[in-house]
Amino acid sequence: MTDKIVGRYRILDRLGEGGVGTVYMAIDNRLGRIVALKFLRHRLLESPQTRCRFRREALIAAALNHPNICTIYDIDEHRGRPYIVMEFLRGRPLSERFPGCFDTHSVLDVGLPLLHALAAAHARSVIHRDIKPANVFIVDNGHVKLLDFGVAKAAEFDEGHLRPDQTTNPGDDLDTGIGRFVGTVGYMSPEQARGETLDARSDIFSLGTLLYEIATDEQPFVGSTQAAVFERIFHADPPSLPCLNPALSPALVRVIDKALSKRRGARYQSAADMLVELEQIRPPSQRRGPRTTRLASISEFRPILSEDISSTVLDRSLPRRTVRREIESS
Ligand SMILES: Nc1ncnc2c1ncn2[C@@H]1O[C@H](COP(=O)(O)OP(=O)(O)OP(=O)(O)O)[C@@H](O)[C@H]1O
Ligand SMILES: [Mg+2]
């Protein structure tokens, strides 16, 4: 095995890193297509239970087939290190959008496809558990895709589970190996922050935090420590949406507020229920299915790679050592 060949894939570039692992762009040598490989962090691999959970969650997510869900092609191991092979998305994560509030239609352009994706996943009893802007991709053609189904669940392990009494500052690297997971706490539902058993309504709450953020350019629950963020998630009402963005449709404000109810019983009981209400906000002539939902307002985003990947990727010369070092050490 050479330094940049992983199974039938040749690593081409490093795309980024999250709490769970590092993502690379690669080419599938057999099918000749570009894919994304996500390697689980070394530190998360110490527990055989975690490895097993990672594989199981990836297999469950791989069964999802939906235009608004990033497709998982395969799961494999490289030198004992599991990785997921998934659809390579050309575009930008929502976390890298330009600053500023979205208007009502743009919030719908993001929210509706995400609800279609969640409704399909929940129908198969799959909960996402880590809905946040970094896990939502705006593809260059304007389509919205949800990534990383179940991966957060797979990465949780007993001694590393986030607790309300932890006081780590956002950005700190926890000894547990979860690392940047702390950045995710602001999107957690109250029951998730308490470490309780989750159901689909937890995803509804997290989606509410995401829609609130794009509608106002502010996260609803912030604090200087993780414990402070949890405190707000448990007890505080976020600043009123119309105060931060007076142009928002009152109907949209009601939908987001309901999704952010502290008690699960007061929220939408399913993604399908929330979808119906969100759909009503759009004039009938503009209602579309999930596949054709386009995000015109941020379609001017520059792609990750400016060159045409399909024509140039095979000739690209790589910093081989750098890529190898990153795969082995991340
Ligand atoms: N399928 C993909 N296609 C293209 N780029 C991707 C893909 N998946 C991830 N990326 C890129 O890799 C970066 C890291 O992704 P990753 O999921 O590891 O991080 P994260 O979402 O911030 O954290 P988390 O581990 O909590 O999911 C993303 O921000 C994105 O730029
Ligand atoms: Mg992610």
Image: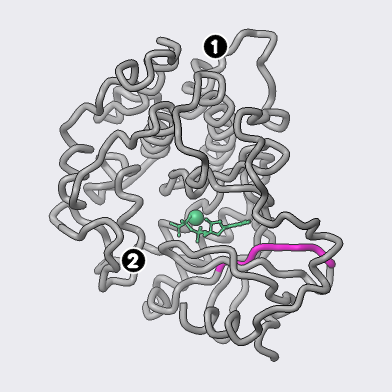
Q: With 241 as the anchor, is 311 left or right in this view?
A: right
Is 265 in the magenta? no
Q: Measured from the top left, where is residue 282 in percent x and y?
A: 58, 13
Residue at x 39% of width, y 23% of height: 256
Q: With 18 as the anchor, is 156 left or right in this view?
A: left
The amino acid sitting under disc 2 is Gly
Q: Please say if 50 is above or below 282.
A: below
Residue at disc 2, secondary structure: helix
Residue 191 sits in quarter: top left
Instruction: Determine crowd level at label 1: few under 14, some 14-19, many 20+ residues with C-alpha closer than 10 A.
Output: few
Mark 2 and ligand 1: say if the CB distance to the nearest ligand atom is below 8 Å: no
| C-alpha distance separating marks 2 and 1 | 40 Å
Residue 60 sits in quarter: bottom right
The amino acid sitting under disc 1 is Gln
Is 36 in the magenta? yes
Magenta: main secondary structure equals: strand
Q: Which residue is mark 1?
A: 280
Q: Please say if 119 is above or below 90.
A: above
Q: Mark 2 vs mark 1: which is more N-terminal?
A: 2
Q: Measured from the top left, where is residue 248 in percent x and y?
A: 43, 15
Q: Which residue is mark 2?
A: 179
* Residues rendered magenta in the picture: 32-38
Q: Please say if 255 is above or below 88.
A: above
Residue at x 69% of width, y 90% of height: 2
Residue at x 59% of width, y 69% of height: 14
Q: With 218 as the anchor, is 251 left or right in this view?
A: right
The answer to whether residue 35 is seen in the rendering is yes
Instruction: Determine crowd level at label 2: few under 14, some 14-19, many 20+ residues with C-alpha closer than 10 A.
Output: some
Residue at x 69% of width, y 60% of height: 73
